Amino acid sequence: MATARKAELGNSRLGNSGLIQEYLVYLRVEKGLRPLSCEAYGRDLLQFAEFLEGESTTLLEGTQALVAGFLKHLSKHGVESRSAARKLSCLRGFYRWLLLDKRIHRDPTLNLESPATWKVLPKSLAVAEVDSMLDRAAMAANLPQADAVALRDCAILELLYAAGLRVSELTGLNVADLSLDAGRALVRGKGDKERIVPLGRASIQALEEYLRKGRPALEKECSSRLFLSMRGQPLGRGWVWHLVKHSGSAASPHMLRHSCATHMVERGADLRTVQTLLGHADIATTQIYTHLALGRLKAVHREHHPRAKRVAP
């Protein structure tokens, strides 16, 4: 039995190798692909063939379940979605070639979702965790002996959560970008695209206190930047990360940004509004929060649809 098994595996390797080489010749001669591209396709096909050998089957016997299992295997071993999407694209071309050549009767890559569309919801904090973090910062800022740094740190945390800012957007803010009377701020996002973000009452109060008592004490020379270090220099990204990380829950500035979006969607905000607030160029980026919106939709449906609470007779 063991000898037969070894012979079977050896034959499958030879068969897979020959099929791959034949396909690469087709890519070079018929499709005119460059050598480096063909090498990349060859590596991807060889990796899939080795996966199939572990499943005791061959490339010609590949099924949709096996291709899906291969993608799951890649994800489990930390392969990025872009790389996995490229490998799936390679398999699509390969099996399309086999289908056209009538060596198989069904394309196993049909109807498989591309790994490029895999979305993982970023980690966010619970509302209670955010409240606890901000309450501690506010308590430190409200002490009689509170210094300028405490006022600054409180304003930073409140602003990160209230407006869902990126770190670079926060450190790039100027004093002139604030319109506290109107409850808003002008933010410059990726590609220097500007957007107006609303500010909640708590963040406005924290910013007013910082501008009145904290920033004048930190400003050593004329600077337009909103947030300054103890030496009067514009505050760097690294310090903001350090501040948030040590403010509780081992959080990060990006986690506060996602917490802002998550909590808004959970309370009924539509995705277009969240897209505008976060400064996403494409709604597809914001759609990672879709399942939260669907949860809200289900809750509203159960509450208001006349037959959602239908009692069985």
Image: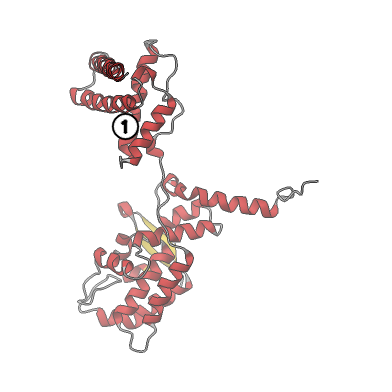
Q: Which residue is mark 1?
A: 86
Taking the image as shown, residue 204 lies to the left or right of residue 91, namely right
Residue ranking furthest to the right: 313
- Quarter of the image containing the N terminus? top left
- Residue 93, image quadrant: top left
Residue ranking furthest to the bottom: 144
Taking the image as shown, residue 119 lies to the left or right of residue 150, namely right
- Residue 210, image quadrant: bottom left
- Measured as percent of width and height from the top left, residue 11 is found at 28, 15
Q: Is residue 35 visible?
A: yes
Amino acid type, residue under disc 1 in the picture: Arg
- Residue 206, image quadrant: bottom left
- How would you rate the neighbour count of disc 1 (Cα within 10 Å): few for under 14, some for 14-19, many for 20 or more? some
Residue drawn at the location 46% of the way across and 47% of the way down: 287
Residue drawn at the location 37% of the way across and 34% of the way down: 71
Q: For this rendering, which residue is in front, 54 or 86?
A: 54
- Measured as percent of width and height from the top left, residue 18 is found at 25, 14
Q: For this rendering, which residue is in front, 143 or 202?
A: 143
User: In this picture, is 166 found above or below 88?
Assistant: below
- Measured as percent of width and height from the top left, residue 121 is found at 43, 50
